[in-house]
Image (cartoon, helix red, strand yellow):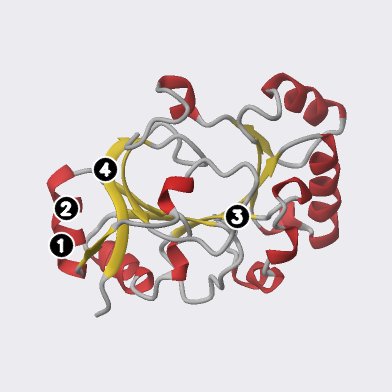
């Protein structure tokens, strides 16, 4: 089984999406094919350390936390991510993956909770969206729009309508931290009756926004 290049493995509080607030072990895989303008994990683009499958599992077991999330970078850019998720599921963990939406999600095990971005124009990566991924989204999964400005919000509403996303799965609206004020997004969502829910990145309010390992 191919080794995994990993930036960090740590336990913290899940700060986003449906399991926000739960203790969670995070496996941050190194590398990403995208370069979003507002990316908050640039440190994960390069470096890292090679871990065997068994070494990752042993580290996760040390923390003893039920929820485990694969994140990045882009975890699906590494072939070993899919078998690792399956093993974690088989061992009884509640497994999540946060993916940028540019890599196919078709091989992700069905028991894994998918949190998938659809990149808005403000990210600079809108052309990287792999729209065929919508065929593999489950009703329990989540699609996230990270918004930098009003234009992103309007684009997200149009995309939700065009692809009937609110009928396919849960939809999340999130502020690009430091670029869009939460109050503005809340006001827009109420005024436009946005078909989804707003989230804040909880960990960035508990710890410093640029803190690692949290």
Q: CA distance from mark 4 to mark 2?
A: 9 Å
- How many numbered marks does the figure carry? 4
Per the rendering, the mark at residue 55 is 1
Q: Which residue is mark 3?
A: 35
Query: Which quarter of the figure is the C terminus placed in?
Result: top left
Image position of 1 (left or right of 212): left
Asked if disc 1 and disc 2 are in contact, CB closer than 8 Å, the reply is yes
Residue 180 image-quadrant placement: top right
Instruction: Report the front residue among 180 and 157.
Output: 180
Between marks 3 and 2 in the image, the one whose residue lies nearer the viewer: 3
The residue at the point 52 percent across, 31 percent down is: 201
Which one is earlier in the sequence, the residue at label 4 or at label 3? Answer: 4
Q: Which residue is mark 2?
A: 59
The residue at the point 21 percent across, 64 percent down is: 51
Q: CA distance from mark 4 to mark 1?
A: 14 Å
Residue 122 image-quadrant placement: top right
Which one is earlier in the sequence, the residue at label 1 or at label 3? Answer: 3
Q: CA distance from mark 4 to mark 3?
A: 24 Å
The answer to whether residue 14 is above or below residue 35 is above
Residue 167 image-quadrant placement: bottom right
């Amino acid at each position: 089984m191919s080794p995994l290049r990993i930036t960090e493995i740590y336990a913290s509080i899940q700060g986003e999406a449906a399991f926000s607030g739960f203790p969670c072990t995070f496996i941050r895989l190194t590398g990403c094919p995208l370069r979003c303008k507002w990316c908050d994990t640039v440190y994960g683009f390069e470096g890292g350390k090679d871990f065997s499958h068994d070494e990752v599992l042993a580290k996760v077991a040390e923390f003893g936390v039920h929820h485990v999330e694969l994140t990045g970078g882009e975890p699906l850019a590494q072939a070993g991510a899919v078998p690792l998720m399956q093993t974690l599921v088989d061992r009884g963990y509640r497994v999540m993956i946060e993916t940028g939406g540019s890599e196919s999600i078709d091989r992700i095990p069905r028991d894994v909770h998918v949190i998938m971005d659809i990149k808005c124009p403000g990210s600079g990566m809108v052309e990287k969206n792999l729209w065929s991924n919508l065929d593999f989204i489950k009703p329990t999964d989540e699609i996230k729009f990270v918004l930098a400005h009003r234009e992103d919000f309007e684009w997200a509403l149009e995309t939700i309508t065009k692809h009937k996303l609110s009928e396919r799965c849960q939809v999340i609206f999130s502020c690009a931290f430091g670029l869009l004020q939460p109050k503005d997004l809340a006001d827009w969502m109420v005024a436009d009756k946005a078909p989804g829910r707003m989230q804040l990145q909880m960990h960035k309010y508990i710890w410093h926004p640029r803190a690692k390992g949290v």
